[in-house]
């Protein structure tokens, strides 16, 4: 029997999850000077890591885009459901302003409740991918994970001490 409680993912976050934004192709293809803005798409998530070197540099953006920018330890999860859901964590991003595409969700874990790498490991688990695929909407390449399904998914949550041990030993 499981001795740890089940907790909704939404209860482990400091803010409501948000979906990224669409930046028009003419902006993505435009000449860029030296800017700290980058545009993250799911193709930049390789083996559940953000490939920082391959993220598209984009022109300086209006401040309203900042809500779509990643902060350290934010978790990114793909909206499109395939056999394997892409999940990554924002690590070592420094001064970069990484804007998420509209095909990604951002989760901001509450470090007082869940270790970000523990949550990433849970969301990266093949069982989570199967669950999300079952509850996705649409079909084929347009099959997407509704935000309410993600938020209301319950996970087993050991105490932080055990999460830290898990992260230290397995992540």
Image: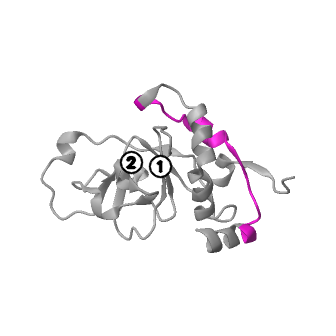
Q: Secondary structure at mark 2?
A: helix
Please identify the quadrant where the C terminus is shown: bottom right
93 in relation to 81, above or below: below
Residue in the foreground of this view, choosing between 143 and 96: 143
From the viewer's perspective, is 62 left or right of 109? Answer: left
Q: Disc 2 vs disc 1: Cβ atoms closer than 8 Å? A: yes
Residue at point 18%, 65% (across, down): 34
Location of residue 97 in the rendering, given as x and y in whole percent from the top left corner? 34, 60
Q: Find numbered disc 1 in the image and state the secondary structure of the residue it sits on.
A: loop
Q: x and y percent of residue 12 in the render? A: 66, 54
Report if residue 140 lies within the magenta region: no
The answer to which of 49 and 72 lies nearer the viewer is 49
Q: Earlier in the sequence, mark 2 or mark 1?
A: 2
Q: Which residue is mark 1?
A: 86
Residue 163 location, x and y as percent?
Answer: 70, 66
Residue 59: image quadrant is bottom left
Q: Which residues are magenta?
A: 141-162
Task: Indicate which disc residue 1 carries.
Answer: none
Q: Is residue 126 visible?
A: yes
Q: Nearer the viewer, residue 43 or 75?
A: 43
User: Which residue is at 48% across, 38% downward?
Assistant: 82
Q: Which residue is mark 2?
A: 42
Relative to 142, is 62 on the left or the right?
left
Report the front residue among 47 and 61: 47
Q: Residues within 10 Å of mark 1 (few under 14, many from 20)?
A: many
- Indicate left or right for 45 with 145 as reference: left
Farthest residue in the top direction? 138
């Amino acid at each position: 029997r499981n001795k740890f409680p089940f907790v909704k993912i939404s209860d482990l976050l400091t803010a409501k999850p948000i979906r990224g934004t669409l930046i028009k192709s003419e902006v993505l293809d435009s000449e860029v000077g030296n800017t700290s803005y980058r545009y993250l798409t799911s193709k930049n998530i390789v083996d559940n890591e953000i490939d920082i070197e391959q993220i598209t540099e984009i022109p300086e953006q209006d401040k309203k885009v900042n809500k779509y920018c990643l902060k350290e330890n934010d978790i990114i999860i793909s909206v499109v459901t395939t056999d394997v859901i892409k999940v990554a964590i924002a690590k070592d991003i420094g001064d970069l302003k990484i804007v998420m595409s509209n095909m990604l969700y951002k989760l901001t874990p509450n470090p007082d409740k869940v270790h970000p790498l523990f949550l990433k490991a849970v969301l990266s688990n093949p069982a989570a991918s199967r669950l999300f695929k079952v509850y996705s909407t649409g079909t084929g390449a347009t099959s997407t994970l509704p935000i309410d399904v993600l938020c209301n998914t319950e996970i087993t949550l050991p105490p932080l001490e055990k999460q830290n041990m898990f992260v230290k030993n397995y992540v």
